[in-house]
Structures are given as C-alpha cells and as structure tokens.
Image (cartoon, rainbow, N blue to C red):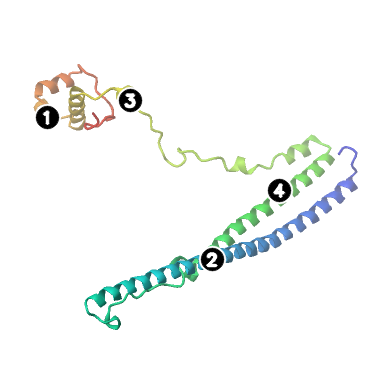
Amino acid sequence: MSGMTKADRDQLMRLAGKRAKLAKSKVVEREKVLLAEATDLMTAEFEARDQLWAEATTIAEEACRKANDQIAAQCSLLGIPANKAPKLDLMWRSRSMDFSDPSRKAELRRLALDRLAALTATAKSVIDEQLLEVETALISDGLQSDDAMAFLEKIPTPEQLMPSLSLDDLGVRHWQPPQGAAAELLTPSTTAGRKRKAVLRAIAANPGASDRKVGEIAGVDHKTVAKYRGGEIPAITGDFLSDDAS
C-alpha cells in the first residue's frame, strides 16, 4: 500500500465501516432465519414421532382386543357369559409423555435461542475484529514516525491481559508420587510384604506407641515391630497395594 494516498485510505476506511455495519445487520437477519429453520426441524421431528406413536397405539389396541377375545373364550368354558367376562381396558395416551409435554418444545426453543445468540455475538465480534485489522493496516501505512508506530503497538491483546489459568491459580497442589512408588506397585504382594506394610502404617499412625502396642494394632509380635522401627527395612511413604490385592 506504499503508493496509496491519504484520500485513498480515508475512503477505504469509510467503505470498510459501511460494509461491517451491513454485515452485522445481516447477522441479525441470519439469526432469525436460522431460528425459523430450527423451529421447522423441531416441528417436523415431533410430527414424525407423533405418527410413530399413533402406529404404536394401534398395535397396542389390537393386542388388547385379542387378549379380551381369549378371556371371553376361557370364561365361556367356565360357564361365564361373554357380557359378564372381565376385560382389559387400555389406558393409552395419544402421545408419548416426552412429546405431549408442551414445555419440551419450549425448552428446545430456548436452547436454540441461546445457541443462536452465542453465534450472533461471535459473528459480530469477528466482523469488528476484521474491520479493526483493515483500519489498522490503512492507518499504520500512513504513519511516518517510529513514535507513532510504537504507540500503536502499546494496546495489549486479550491474551496478554487474560493468561491461561493454572492449577496453582486455583489453589490445587501438584501431587507427586513418593519415591519408589512404581517399584512398589510392580512388586508382587506377599504375606511378608503385607505384614511389613501393616506394621509401618501402624508405626506412622501411632508414633508414640510402644512396640507391643503397635504389634497389637498390626497383629504381629513386638520383636517384629522393633525390627522394622529400627530401620532394617526402609519405611514406605504411601499405601500403594491394599492388603487384598494379592
């Protein structure tokens, strides 16, 4: 655009503004058209399901008639007149509850309105963004000084003002597995291993208890507790394999 005059840029900016305004008005019109299309789709779907439900009702009525014929025949064998025989009465709605509730269509219409409102807002935002890009390109091409260009670059972007959230921002601490966790998980469970874990858990949960008391909790003798407390077998920092995982 180096050969473009200031008058050219001014005219292009005015034209771009008019086109953006027209595009946003068409977005509003498009929203109405899409809502009408969605309503037509819902109506057609409900009518199709109504027809399906009517066919199901016919099947149920026929089954009920056959059942009553059988009941009358059996009652006749027992000496009960046909007009005195019990009958099945079919309590059948003309439409499924899913489609007879008028609030269902209203709910779907609200859903369509919400989604179209979001699409409309996004479309208008994109139009404004593209208009701004055109205006920025036209204006920046006419800027002469470095100070003017630097001023243009000062406006921060939404990404700069609103960085992504991390778990730390939400107060969530990062969990790291204890050292040796993988080996602990892959080591087959044995009776001795389960006993060791039970003792170490009891020691960790009752640091001030005597060896005899810890032994009572873990189900071992106090000599075994003393051996583990003395550090012959390193303590584990997590319960990675339950007692019933053998």
Mark 2 = which residue? 46
Cα distance between the residues tagged 1 and 4: 72 Å
Q: Which mark is residue 219?
A: 1
Q: Earlier in the sequence, mark 4 or mark 3?
A: 4
236 lies above or below 37: above
Q: Earlier in the sequence, mark 1 or mark 3?
A: 3
31 lies above or below 152: below
Q: Residues within 10 Å of mark 4 (few under 14, many from 20)?
A: few
Quadrant of the frame with the N terminus:
top right
Cα distance between the residues tagged 1 and 3: 25 Å
Cα distance between the residues tagged 2 and 1: 68 Å
Foreground: disc 2 or disc 1:
2
Nearer the observer, 231 or 111:
111
Foreground: disc 4 or disc 2:
2
- Amino acid type at image mark 3: Ala
Q: Position of residue 137 (x, y in %)?
A: 79, 42
- Amino acid type at image mark 4: Glu
Helix, strand, or loop for circle 2? helix
Q: Which mark is residue 181?
A: 3
User: In the figure, residue 114 lies in which quadrant?
Assistant: bottom right
Q: Is residue 155 left or right of residue 215?
A: right
For image coordinates 31% across by 76% down, the residue present is 87
Q: Earlier in the sequence, mark 2 or mark 1?
A: 2
Q: Which mark is residue 129?
A: 4
Foreground: disc 4 or disc 3:
3
User: In the figure, residue 215 lies in which quadrant?
Assistant: top left
Cα distance between the residues tagged 3 and 2: 57 Å
41 lies above or below 241: below
Q: Is residue 119 left or right of residue 217?
A: right
Q: Earlier in the sequence, mark 3 or mark 2?
A: 2
Quadrant of the frame with the C terminus:
top left
